[in-house]
């Protein structure tokens, strides 16, 4: 089987790494298409160095732009590659503009399409990621779900026949790479941090970064915490941050740094007092490594992290964020809904069936 993988944004390199390794292990071929949505070395290159994901066979260099334009560029450039290159199935990941553009390209090129991390819903259609998820799920032939909740969400939309619960490849990645991260990452020493002696924060959602009032309140809340806050700054956030960070009371406690590598991020999460984030992936990673999370969003797709007590939704209101920090608790049990850490193997088996079905159709 030859699988065309489409990735383009930071979380997709991490989600794709376990599947890339499992495909190779099982003797399948992979054509790796990087859309170029993320292009800074710290947002892209570093993950290909650290993780067992193959180097991109093609980089479409789509770069930044208006969302519709970004999707259109991914669509037209990916379609050309898919038409020129043989592949049995196409795989897209998550909910970015690269996901949707890649999914549309697979459809237009007439290739069977599988969506990894299908069925997630925030029920907030104002989020670009929610639009991308819904449209990609409805375009896909095979919906590979990380949790039973995701399968239920797809049932409600009449998509259950295409849905399969395989578990979460981000769980696979933590299982595979946390021991390496602990033994190899120098990040705590480099930043002079003690385990449990700092918070880790990330902010990149457009509704948190693009309104200066909202971003200012978030920075103010971080600055008022009683431990240093390590803050790897996403490029979207960097563009809008300077004024906010300089003017916040207590800003000295915020350690704004470049985006960190995957291994450094795992260690920073594992040893933090808590993670404060609007990232989807980090809400789960915090749970996987056993650190409580405070989510800087009003809602989440990963409801199991909240129901199990590992995650608290605080939005962008400083009072709610401070109350969540003061009430931090670490549950004793982790929910087992994210699979057993071997989702990638199940995905390979499902892709083989999809390729066979299409081949005999
Ligand atoms: C994207 C995804 C989001 C995902 C996030 C992870 C969409 C709609 N959103 O958001 O789901 O959680 O990635 O990071 O696809 N930029 C740089 N350098 C880079 C990458 C981006 O400067 O390497 C700048 C771009 O110029 C742009 C801004 O960051 O102005 C936002 O980038 P974009 O790719 O549109 O979305 P993200 O915010 O990264």
Image (tube, rainbow, N blue to C red):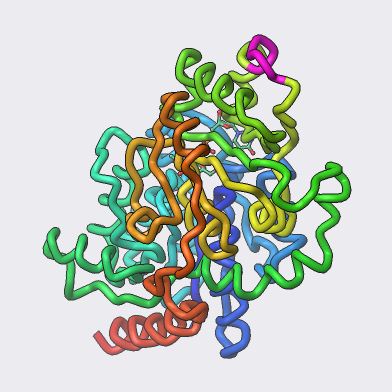
**Residue located at (37% from left, 83% from top):** 350
Describe residue 19's horizontal placement relative to residue 257 as left or right: left
Can you say whether 243 is above or below 335 in the image? above
Can you say whether 7 is above or below 327 in the image? below
Ligand 1 located in image quadrant: top right
Q: Position of residue 314 (x, y in %)?
A: 40, 36
Can you say whether 231 is above or below 130 in the image? above
Q: Position of residue 108 (x, y in %)?
A: 32, 57
The residue nearer to you, when weighing 133 against 324, is 324
The residue nearer to you, when weighing 168 against 344, is 168
**Residue located at (59% from left, 61% from top):** 14
**Residue located at (39% from left, 32% from top):** 315
The residue nearer to you, when weighing 294 against 140, is 294
Q: Quadrant of residue 110?
A: bottom left
The residue nearer to you, when weighing 66 against 158, is 158
**Residue located at (24% from left, 68% from top):** 151
Describe residue 8's horizontal placement relative to residue 142 as left or right: right
All told, the count of numbered labels is 0
Describe residue 216's horizontal placement relative to residue 167 as left or right: right
Let me know if residue 248 is in the magenta part.
Answer: yes
Span colored in magenta: 245-251
Can you say whether 270 is above or below 4 in the image? above
Q: Where is residue 318 in the image (x, y as percent from the top left)?
A: 47, 24
Let me know if residue 27 is in the magenta part.
Answer: no
Q: In which quarter of the image is the C terminus?
A: bottom left
Q: Where is residue 352 in the image (x, y as percent from the top left)?
A: 41, 86
């Amino acid at each position: 089987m030859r699988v065309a993988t489409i990735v383009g944004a930071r979380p997709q390199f991490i989600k794709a790494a376990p599947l890339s390794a499992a495909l190779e292990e099982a003797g399948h071929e992979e054509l790796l298409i990087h859309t170029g949505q993320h292009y800074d070395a710290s947002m892209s290159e570093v993950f290909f160095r650290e993780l067992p994901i193959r180097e991109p066979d093609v980089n479409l260099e789509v770069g930044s732009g208006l969302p519709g334009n970004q999707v259109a560029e991914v669509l037209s450039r990916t379609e050309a590659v898919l038409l020129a290159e043989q592949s049995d199935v196409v795989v897209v990941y998550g909910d970015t503009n690269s996901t949707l553009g890649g999914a549309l390209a697979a459809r237009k090129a007439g290739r069977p399409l599988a969506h990894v991390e299908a069925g997630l819903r925030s029920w907030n259609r104002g989020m670009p990621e929610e639009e991308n998820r819904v449209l990609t799920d409805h375009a896909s032939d095979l919906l590979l779900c990380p949790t039973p909740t995701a399968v239920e969400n797809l049932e409600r939309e009449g998509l259950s026949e295409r849905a399969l619960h395989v578990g979460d490849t981000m769980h696979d990645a933590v299982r595979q790479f946390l021991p390496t991260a602990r033994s190899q990452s120098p990040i705590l020493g480099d930043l002079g941090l003690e385990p449990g002696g700092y918070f880790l924060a990330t902010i990149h959602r457009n509704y948190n970064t693009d309104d200066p009032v909202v971003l200012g309140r978030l920075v103010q809340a971080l600055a008022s915490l009683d431990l240093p806050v390590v803050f790897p700054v996403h490029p979207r956030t960097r563009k809008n941050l300077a004024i906010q960070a300089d003017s916040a009371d207590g800003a000295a406690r915020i350690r704004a740094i470049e985006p960190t590598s995957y291994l450094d991020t795992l260690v920073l999460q594992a040893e933090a007092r808590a993670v404060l984030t609007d990232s989807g992936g980090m809400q789960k990673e915090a749970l996987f490594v056993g650190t409580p999370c405070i989510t800087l969003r009003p809602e989440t797709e990963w409801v199991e992290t909240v129901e199990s007590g590992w995650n608290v939704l605080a939005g962008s209101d400083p009072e709610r964020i401070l109350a969540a920090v003061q009430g931090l608790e670490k549950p004793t049990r982790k929910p087992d809904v994210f699979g057993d850490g071997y989702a990638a193997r199940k995905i390979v088996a499902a892709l083989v069936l999809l390729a066979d079905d299409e081949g005999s159709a």
